Amino acid sequence: MAEVVLSVRNLSVSFNTPDGVVHAVNDVSFDLQAGETLGIVGESGSGKSVTAGSLMRLNNSVTATTTGNVVVNGVDVLNCTEDEVRGIRGQDIAMVFQDPLSALNPYYSVGAQIAEAYQVHHADASKDEVEQVVIDMLTKVGIPHPETRLHQYPHQFSGGMRQRIVIAIALVNKPKVLIADEPTTALDVTVQAQILDLMMDLQRETNMAIILITHDLGVVAEVARDVLVMYGGRVVEKASINDLFVAPTHPYSWGLLGAVSSLEDLQRGHLKTIAGTPPSLISIPSGCAFHPRCEFYEGVGSRCSSEVPELRTISSGQSMSACHLDDVQIVSIGKSKVLQ
């Protein structure tokens, strides 16, 4: 049994805004083992990135209220002092942010930014040691001529190269957990494949755990072992990657998989969509947040609009689903959706 390097229990996050309280994350729980890749998927506004930020306690402490437990390498991040959290960030858990250009400081060379991340946790390192570490990291992430390029600035690199530099910053202290928030957004498919291959190679080398946040089910299918499907700030399905694609157990997952483009869809000139729009997290629908968009709502009745479904294990396997449909219905409908 692999070591559990991250344990999240009953994580909830809300933000006070002039328009009301935003319930961004509600009662999220999961474990992550060393060497494992967990995918978190869902539409924009489902709570994926807020969940990721909470794991490193990056949410604004003035406007955000965070409850639950986030245990990284045996330490509960949510109960640490600010100094203790700074010692954990980068060292035990690190993050690759969605937009590498905005994540990098245009005023400093890329080498200086990698060096800063290293020196935070190695204050006694000599100048020569730090420079060698920077060169080694640039080499490891595939930046050519690192001795020269470490002196260059972010604007002098392509989008794919900037993403590699952000990964180098995140991995320079060899963290046990890497959070990758939409790491391939805005990159062409060839560069996407290179970035994903790079992350997987580094994972095999260091045995780090990865949380991959994305809306791209194709990316998840390629690299993840397990998946959390989020909607309205909650986890609505928890499954292995194989079970998600072969036997999905939640109507929202059925909709997401149905919206994945295929050659037949493109030839017909249209794509399948999920009716309606994601809910406002200020006024989340009562009961199951997905019920206003669910095609099976009428068949279940008032429970969907009045009672929040519990995330439970479906009797046919290991997948967990938060749906009021019974197990027999979930299994039969899920199979039919996959065959469509």
Image (tube, rainbow, N blue to C red):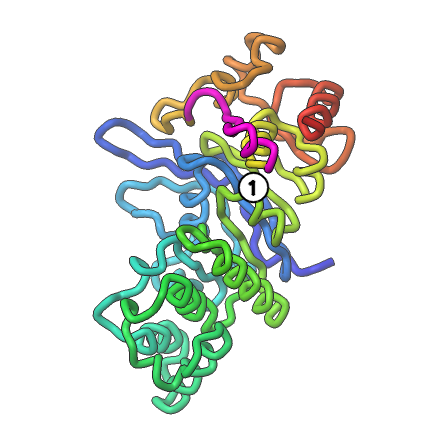
Tell me: residue 223, above or below residue 162: above
In the displayed structure image, the side of residue 203 where residue 246 appears, left or right: right
| Residue 52 x, y percent position in the rendering | 45, 49
| Residue 162 x, y percent position in the rendering | 37, 65
Task: Please give the residue where the numbered disc 1 appears in the rendered image.
Answer: 29
Majority SS type along the magenta span? loop
How many labels were placed on the picture? Answer: 1
In the displayed structure image, the side of residue 145 where residue 297 appears, left or right: right
- Could you tell me if residue 188 is visible in this image? yes
Q: Nearer the viewer, residue 265 or 236?
A: 265
Tell me: residue 175, above or below residue 311: below
Which residue is drawn at the image coordinates 56% and 13% (left, top)? Answer: 297
Q: On the image, which quarter does residue 123 sit in?
A: bottom left
Which residue is drawn at the image coordinates 34% and 89% (left, top)? Answer: 127
Q: Amino acid at mark 1?
A: Ser
Query: Is residue 273 magenta-colored?
Result: yes
Range of magenta residues: 263-277
Q: Nearer the viewer, residue 234 or 262?
A: 262
Task: Give the quadrant of the C terminus.
Answer: top right
Tell me: residue 277, above or below residue 304: below
| Residue 158 x, y percent position in the rendering | 36, 65
Query: Is residue 88 magenta-colored?
Result: no
Task: Give the quadrant of the N terminus.
Answer: bottom right
**Secondary structure state at the residue bearing disc 1:** strand
Q: Give neighbour class at mark 1: few <14, some 14-19, many 20+ (Cα, 10 Å).
A: some
Which residue is drawn at the image coordinates 54% and 21% (left, top)? Answer: 308
Q: Nearer the viewer, residue 134 or 235?
A: 134
In the displayed structure image, the side of residue 299 where residue 136 appears, left or right: left
| Residue 160 x, y percent position in the rendering | 42, 63
Which residue is drawn at the image coordinates 37% and 29% (left, top)? Answer: 281
